[in-house]
Image (spheres, grey):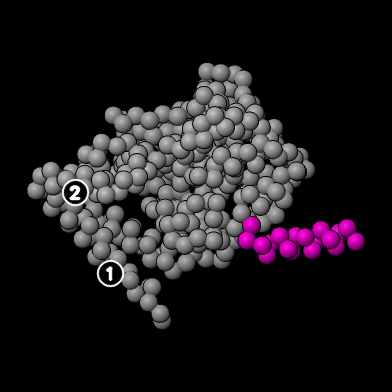
Amino acid sequence: MGFILLQALDQCYTKIMAGIFDYINWRGDLSFRKAPFNPVDNIILTHIAYFPFDRIVGGPEENRGITIAEAAKKISGILKKRPAAFDDELVFRDDPALMAALGSSERYGNLELRYYVNQIDPAAEKQFSAISILGCGDFSLISYRGTDNTIVGWKEDFNMSFSDAVPAQLEAVSYLENTALRVRGPLCLGGHSKGGNLAIYAAAFCKKSIRRRIRAIYSNDAPGFGPKVLESSGFPQIKGRIQSFVPQSSVIGMLFEHPEDYTVVKSRQTGLMQHDVFSWELGRDDVVRMKEMSQESIFMSRTLREWINGLDSERRRRFTDALYEILLSTETNSLPKLGNDWLKSASLIIRGYQGIDGDTKKLIAETVSAFFKAARNNITMLLPH
């Protein structure tokens, strides 16, 4: 009778459009000893790297960690005194609630957070953050943050289109190698968006002795790489350990080259909004899988690839630098601040555009025109057959 009831509950669970909070409610009372680490745990624990743990979790120089339950309690105390304390740094508004849910669960509450770093360097055009999570079974998980709200974080993403390695990728290797000296046993790496890219890059370019300790690399809707990374000696050695997840209408996760296999995840959102893992549908111990990508995702992937490949690296660099210069003219350092007063921001952006030289304006116009040309070349795949 009990077995039949469990089967019925399982079937019911898979029919519900369950998300991260549902999974924590359903499975949060099971330790990793009772229910081993699975793809949903990857999505949750790589996502918490987005939380601004400054002054909550110690840095690489500190040997003592803090449990997720303790961190959640600290966060709650800060929010009671200052409800808007994290507003400027939060990329996802549900993250404080997520931390509270994780902290109160048996599955996640006793996991230990260590070695938090958060580096923003406009001069070097670098945005890098990572955190280590101990206690996920018999391994330690290094979780890399994706792009945050800063304009420099956005700029570094675009720099990937013409650079063999951006500063965050080099920092990711350094972080992995330094952390590997501090923790014993197997390692797993992961991240969402740029964080997944950093995880793969770090695994491919770290020391061989550390690479042998890496059990899995989790990449959640992350951009791919150019030829130099894929042709490196380290990449083939870790390719089989990459577990890549993308929503059915992925855009970010289809950028650049992806030689590894990927799992298509069902999302409740549409278009770019599917990049948010809170929209991904989850089952009892796995994501809700789909057989193939949507036509919209394939269209956007081919369009972006054709557009980027049609621009040489120098044109990509100049186009990116021009957009960055225009955004800097608004005298703000984050994208949410641009949206807080969109009328004023639009005025400053127009003024910034008017202030650049004629050759750069021509470059921007030609580059944008090239994108629409690529879109026209692929539009037929969206038309009914």
Q: Position of residue 81 (x, y in %)?
A: 54, 29
Q: Residue 227 bears which disc, if any?
A: none
Q: Position of residue 366 (x, y in %)?
A: 17, 57
Q: Amino acid at mark 2?
A: Ile
User: Is residue 275 rendered magenta in the image?
Assistant: no
Residue tagged 2: 350
- Residue ID at (57%, 32%): 80
**C-alpha separation, residue under disc 2 versus residue under disc 1:** 27 Å
- Amino acid type indicated by mark 1: Arg
Question: Which marked residue is nearer to the observer: mark 2 or mark 1?
Answer: 2
Q: Is residue 322 above or below residue 79?
A: below
Q: Nearer the viewer, residue 16 or 223?
A: 16
As drawn, the residue found furthest toward the bottom would be: 385
Q: Residues within 10 Å of mark 2 (few under 14, many from 20)?
A: some
User: Which quadrant of the structure image shows residue 12?
Assistant: bottom right
Q: Quadrant of residue 290?
A: bottom right
Horizontally, residue 33 falls left or right of residue 330, namely right
Q: Which mark is residue 376?
A: 1
- Disc 2 element: helix
Residue 88 vs residue 82, the one in the foreground? 82
Q: Is residue 261 visible?
A: no
The mark nearer the N terminus, 2 or 1, is: 2
| Residue 90 in picture, x, y percent from top left | 47, 39
Q: Is residue 8 magenta?
A: yes
